[in-house]
Image (cartoon, helix red, strand yellow):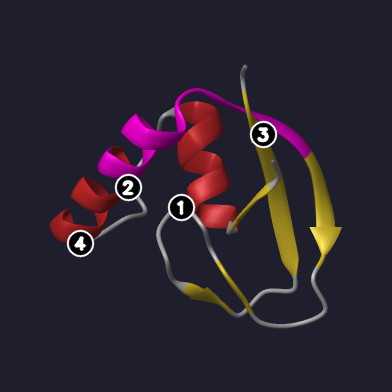
């Protein structure tokens, strides 16, 4: 299962650095999402060609590049 993640959340997932997330509610929501999906590994980046919804934070990403993560099974 491919999960499309924005660049900010990709940094958070890879480095466990969530300092770019300035809203406590968003951070809590991300941690709850991670409890459901489990551990993730980065796979690749793809050009989405425009807007897409980040599956991690739920934000509408304005940047065309999405980072693809997959859960460890």
Q: Nearer the viewer, residue 14 or 2?
A: 2
User: From mark 1 to mark 2, how far is it between C-alphas?
Assistant: 6 Å
Q: Which of marks 1 and 2 is nearer the N terminus?
A: 2
Measure the C-alpha gap from mark 1 to mark 4. 14 Å
| Membership of 55 in magenta stretch | no
Q: Which residue is drawn at 26% across and 41% down?
A: 32
Q: Are marks 1 and 2 in contact (CB under 8 Å)?
A: yes
Q: Position of residue 21 (x, y in %)?
A: 32, 55
Q: Which of marks 3 and 4 is in front?
A: 3
Question: In the visual, does 52 lie left or right of 15?
Answer: right
Q: Which of marks 2 and 4 is nearer the N terminus?
A: 4
* Residue identifier under label 3: 70
Is 18 in front, or is 69?
69
Q: Is residue 59 left or right of residue 64?
A: left
The numbered mark at residue 30 is: 2
Q: Count neighbours of disc 4 (C-alpha within 10 A) and say few if under 14, some if 14 to 19, many if 20 or more.
A: few
**Dot 1 corresponds to which residue?**
56
Distance CA(mark 3)–CA(mark 2)? 16 Å
Give the alpha-carbon distance from disc 1 to disc 3, as whole Å.
12 Å
Residue 13 image position (x, y, % from top left): 50, 35
Mark 3–mark 4 distance (CA, rounded to whole Å): 25 Å
Name the image quarter holding residue 58: bottom left
Which residue is disc 4 drawn over?
A: 23
């Amino acid at each position: 299962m491919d999960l499309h993640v924005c660049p900010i959340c990709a940094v958070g997932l890879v480095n466990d650095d969530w300092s770019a997330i300035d809203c406590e509610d968003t951070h809590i929501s991300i941690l709850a999402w991670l409890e459901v999906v489990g551990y993730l590994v980065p796979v690749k980046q793809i050009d989405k060609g425009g807007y897409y919804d980040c599956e991690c934070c739920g934000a509408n990403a304005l940047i065309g590049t999405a980072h693809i993560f997959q859960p460890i099974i």
